[in-house]
Image: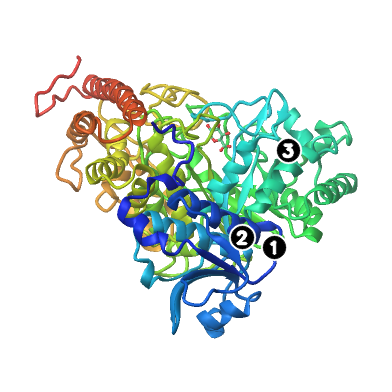
Amino acid sequence: NNNGYSCWLQYDLLGQAAREAAVEWAQDIVLTEAAEQGPLKTAVDELTAGMAAMLGKRPAIVPAPVTGRRYILLGTVGGSAHVARLIGGGETSAFGEESYRIKTVCEPDREAIVLAGGSGKGLLYAVFHFLRLIVTGADLGSLDVTEQPKYGLRMINHWDNMDGSIERGYAGRSFLYADGRVLSGSPRIRDYARLMASIGINGIAINNVNVHRQETMLLTEQLLPDVAAIADAFREYGIRLFLSANYASPVELGETATADPLDAEVAAWWQRAAERVYRHIPDFGGFVVKADSENRPGPFTYGRDHADGANMLAAALKPYGGLVLWRCFVYNCQQDWRDRTTDRARAAYDHFKPLDGRFMDNVVLQIKNGPMDFQVREPVSPLFGAMERTNQIMEFQITQEYTGHQIDVCYLVPQWKQVLEFDTLVKGEGSKVKDIAAGRVHPYSHCGITAVTNVGDDDNWTGHHLAQANLFGYGRLIWNPELSAEQIAAEWVRLTFGDNSEVASAVTDILMESWPAYEKYTSPLGVGWMVRPHLHYGVDVDGYEYSKWGTYHFADRDGVGVDRTVATGTGYAGQYVGANAERYERTSSCPDELLLFFHHVPYTYRLQSGKTVIQHIYDTHFEGVEQVEQWIVRWRSLEGKLDAERFRHIGERLARQLDNAKEWRDVVNTYFYRKSGIPDQGKRVIFV
Ligand code: GCU
């Protein structure tokens, strides 16, 4: 049985053939440089332990090769002459510290596999990659891999609170905190760092962006030693620790009367805070800040703007090399639903775009992938790339807040890929999100990708076993966005479920079909929400329709959707550049999947697919449920072909997903039938 704790690092999954091919390499690891601590030491330990677990034989660490015997050479490009000799210094002269090379080299009297890192960190990534190659049965006799990550910042955000709860967490309680304490001694933290390093994550913010009283204390002398203990564990795996900071910390702690960013006392308070944090954590990454957003404090209270607020914090961190990740999730969350002129989708761009050029260079604006909030389908945020002189980082959501709570399977890598491939046109054709986030469209000094994570203290970390694919896939994708969603899924399946081809193809297919299926049985054509308020799981079509949150679908007897055109609507479509703005502006060119995000149309409106909107709604809702039914049949056929624990667990979640999907189908179809009075051409059961 498999409880899933090792995730994709299950080295006991190695098949017989792969074991035989690899075991010849398991004799000597040649190491010519000191590796007493940090990622370099971790790299050596991970390789030795990984090979021992896979091959039942622990390689010896030796200072020089033994004549006639194959060996693995581990080292950093600058630190080992032996490494430089075998892979050629020239090839690695442009190596960044996170880059690496894996290469089989044939010398006259023996073969070697060289694992060379730009630094200990690069080497650690090389080791995890090499172990993956062994598990997936690669030909070790002819390896030649050169890797460097596309993004500088490859981050994870936790929404964990110190009482042990996790905001939007669906995998148990926090493993970082319980009952107001930091679980700094928990062995799980090291295991977690290991998992994250194995997919290339290099920064983790350990607390919720909604920073309440207890978490404000994380910045104090009282709790910093505990935070530092987590940072120590992270550091061994090349990960920098970040904290979410309460913008009004000095006020919250009763040490200043104001949090006005232009007040000298406030600035001095933050300078002392920064000095304190860096005394405990010399490589501290910086602050993530949710300010003036969903009732969190911010500079608006003092008549200041976001640049004033962010720069004040950035000035405090600057001497130590720290960053301020300032979130752009800023909108009016007290909207009157009667007010048709305010559009939440516009808010981030309207707030931030005019501030371009005013932020310090250690500020990075953190922008959610869509303009609303992690719906199953949204257009790409028009703010991303719209600020030439302001660093930006893209924020995804791995935790399945609006995509099934890790009860329903929903593999999100295809969604993220679509976002990354979107061409913003901000500097003409070829201004893709994936390149903006890498600082290749505008010369950003700090940028990359971050995401709200989906882990908790469940044995398998993610609640649903299959939700591990999202965590793994996130890391792999932001290391190399050229990988396809299917490649990543197949790799994860192989590492997690072994080499039974029937199991592998079933799981890969389910993953690949899952985002489209989830979209089919939930809210149609990009309109969003229709979820149960606050909980965000399950259907409630009008749950947010008369609320203050700015998330409406405006369904009436004639039609549905939000008019966000420049001509007759909120003007949001005009926040895009050139041809994108034009494409979204007109119903005829707006992609079907986003039609109701941009337009209010009659139910009889004919989509590019040829179907009417109402028939599309009926068809997709039936299809979504049928898809889940097919998975269940397929899953049952796998009995006995994988461990009983995961077979049972996933089967049980699929059954719950089916219930959810049916409820969505029937409620949505009934709702729109009652509104429109138009029958389903397929004459299927709709509850009138
Ligand atoms: C969503 C989510 C909140 C979260 C917020 C954020 O609205 O529902 O729980 O705090 O996003 O990203 O700040």
Residue 156 appears in view: yes
- Compute the Cα span from label 2 to label 3: 21 Å
Q: Who comes first in sequence, dot 1 or dot 2?
A: 1
Q: Residue furthest front?
A: 67
Q: For mark 2, what is the residue?
A: 391
Amino acid type of disc 2?
Asn
Side of 260 relative to 403 (left or right):
right
Q: Position of residue 359 (x, y in %)?
A: 69, 58
Query: Where, by quadrant of the figure, is residue 388 drawn?
Result: bottom right
Q: Are marks 1 and 2 in contact (CB under 8 Å)?
A: yes
SS for tag 2?
A: loop
Q: Amino acid at mark 1?
A: Asp
Which of the numbered marks, if any, corresponds to residue 246? 3
> Which quadrant of the figure contains the N terminus?
top left
Proximity of marks 1 and 3: CB atoms separated by less than 8 Å: no
Q: Which mark is residue 361?
A: 1
Where is 93 relative to 15, above or below?
below
N-term-proximal mark, 1 vs 3: 3
Amino acid type for the residue under numbered disc 3 = Asn
Residue at disc 1, secondary structure:
loop
Q: Position of residue 666 (x, y in %)?
A: 24, 20
Q: CA distance from mark 1 to mark 2?
A: 7 Å
Identify the residue shown where x is 34% and y is 42%. 497
The residue at the far top in this view is 688
Residue 317: name its quadrant.
bottom right
Mark 2, residues whose alpha carbon is within 10 Å: few (<14), some, or many (≥20)? many
User: Is 275 left, or right, of 173 in this rendering?
Assistant: right
Q: Nearer the viewer, residue 533 or 349?
A: 533
